[in-house]
Image: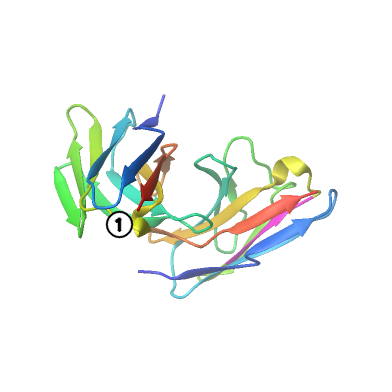
Amino acid sequence: KNQVEQSPQSLIILEGKNCTLQCNYTVSPFSNLRWYKQDTGRGPVSLTIMTFSENTKSNGRYTATLDADTKQSSLHITASQLSDSASYICVVSQGAQKLVFGQGTRLTINP
Amino acid sequence: SAVISQKPSRDICQRGTSLTIQCQVDSQVTMMFWYRQQPGQSLTLIATANQGSEATYESGFVIDKFPISRPNLTFSTLTVSNMSPEDSSIYLCSAGMTGGNEQFFGPGTRLTVL
């Protein structure tokens, strides 16, 4: 069964701290893996997209990693800010435009 | 990139009525999709909106309940018909190019059915 599982389900950290979110997938065929940020009441916004051959990609304070052998990905957030409070969704593309969504990690940054 | 707008942004509707949600993309795209996001859940694909032909629905979603139109490459509508409280959800439109890696999302329409 094609699935994307994320952990933790929710996370609370203090402003300025780092954190890492995890994503495991069993999607086949694999086209690419995306991390989206979804602010409350808004649509998801793409942070990174990685294909099979890429094992790391950065977007500012966000760094995503991909291990295609173990089918795991992580999203590392450095020096967190209050505006990082959001849901982070791991999405695996199964062929052309067919997306399998994780349940998301709800991240809260406290001052 | 593509900028996607949706109207309305939110609505409160009575049971048994219908609501049509509009999605406008600022550039021509080949692929448009409609998703549902129930409270605390991730996104579920309802259908792919095909230009000039019937939409392609995912398992569990039917045209009579969620009729979709796509008259051109930049615009689509989703109607939620004969609504019940179980239809309360956020409905999102997304768009992308065939074979492309990116899929852009609209801000969503928050629907509450009483």
Q: Nearer the viewer, residue B62 or A75?
A: A75
Find the magenta span and give its range: B76-81
Q: Position of residue A32 (x, y in %)?
A: 27, 44
Q: Position of residue A104 (x, y in %)?
A: 42, 40
Identify the residue at horizontal 44%, vertical 72% (top origin): B28
Horizontal side of residue A41 vs A91, given as left or right: right
Identify the residue at horizontal 66%, vertical 67% (top origin): B8
Q: Which residue is mark 1?
A: A81
Identify the residue at horizontal 14%, vertical 42% (top origin): A55
Residue B99 can be seen in this image: no
In the rendered image of this protein, does residue B46 appear above or below residue A8?
below
In the rendered image of this protein, does residue B73 appear above or below residue B63?
below
Instruction: Report crowding for label 1: few under 14, some 14 to 19, many 20 or more residues within 10 A (C-alpha).
Output: some
- In magenta stretch: residue B77: yes
SS state under label 1: loop
Image colouring: rainbow
Q: Position of residue A107 (x, y in %)?
A: 38, 44
Horizontal side of residue B52 vs A45, given as left or right: right
In the rendered image of this protein, does residue B75 appear above or below residue A26?
below
Q: Amino acid at mark 1?
A: Gln
Q: Position of residue A47 (x, y in %)?
A: 30, 55
Please state the chain letter of the residue tagged with numbered disc 1 in the rendered image.
Answer: A
